[in-house]
Amino acid sequence: MNLTRFKNRLLTRLATVVPGLAQRFIDGYQPQESAGEIPWVAPAKPLRQAKLALVTTSGIHHQKQQPFDMNDSDGDPSFRALNGEELFDDFQITHDYYDHTDARKDPNIIFPLGPLGELVREGVLGSLAQTHYAFMGHIDGRHITTLVEKTAREVAAKLKTDQVDLVLLTPA
């Protein structure tokens, strides 16, 4: 592990143990502003008929997939397609900016496939997509343009092709 990754993991651990340190990180964060209005689209069909996909910024992915690049200080704007039926059998998390301890014990914390499956079985939600998508949540600097203009659009197109009606974003 390189020095940058070690430093990131150490700071994440400290921020978990010392809430005041976490607050200092939060207070120092400057979000990227979006231009224009955030579009709102009313659901086209009732929830009990809708197909839902998850999109996460938790850095979860299948073990056989390439890990997210944690050596780039601006993050990794790429995504991983996730098979919802197999993910919890072989997952790993590549993201140095939060504590994975609880997510490793129960990945539903960051990617709630189990609870959403219960909603499908109860008839509250129509169905779950087979393919879901993961990003690494720390994306900054030069990679923001790539995320907004390329990879997020690719994922949106894939969701449309899969006839997904609703997307639930789960940050980590």
Image (cartoon, rainbow, N blue to C red):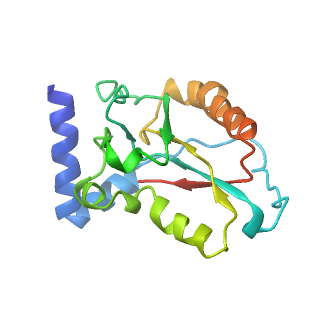
Q: Which residue is at a point 74% across and 35% down the rendered structure image?
A: 161
Position of residue 112 relative to residue 68, above or below, is: below
Q: Position of residue 78 (x, y in %)?
A: 49, 28
Quadrant placement of the N terminus: top left
Quadrant placement of the C terminus: bottom left
Residue 6: quarter of image: top left
Q: Position of residue 65 (x, y in %)?
A: 37, 28
Q: Position of residue 148 (x, y in %)?
A: 63, 32
Q: Position of residue 20 (x, y in %)?
A: 24, 65
Left or right of 166? Residue 132 is left
Left or right of 124? Residue 114 is left
Position of residue 55 relative to residue 146, above or below, is: below
Left or right of 19? Residue 108 is right
Q: Which residue is at a point 65% across and 29% down the rendered structure image?
A: 154
Task: Tell which of 8 and 122 is nearer to you.
Answer: 122
Residue 62: quarter of image: top left
Task: Tell which of 104 and 84 is nearer to you.
Answer: 84
Position of residue 130 relative to residue 79, above or below, is: below
Left or right of 66? Residue 119 is right
Q: Which residue is at a point 38% across and 62% down the rendered structure image?
A: 109
Residue 72: quarter of image: top left
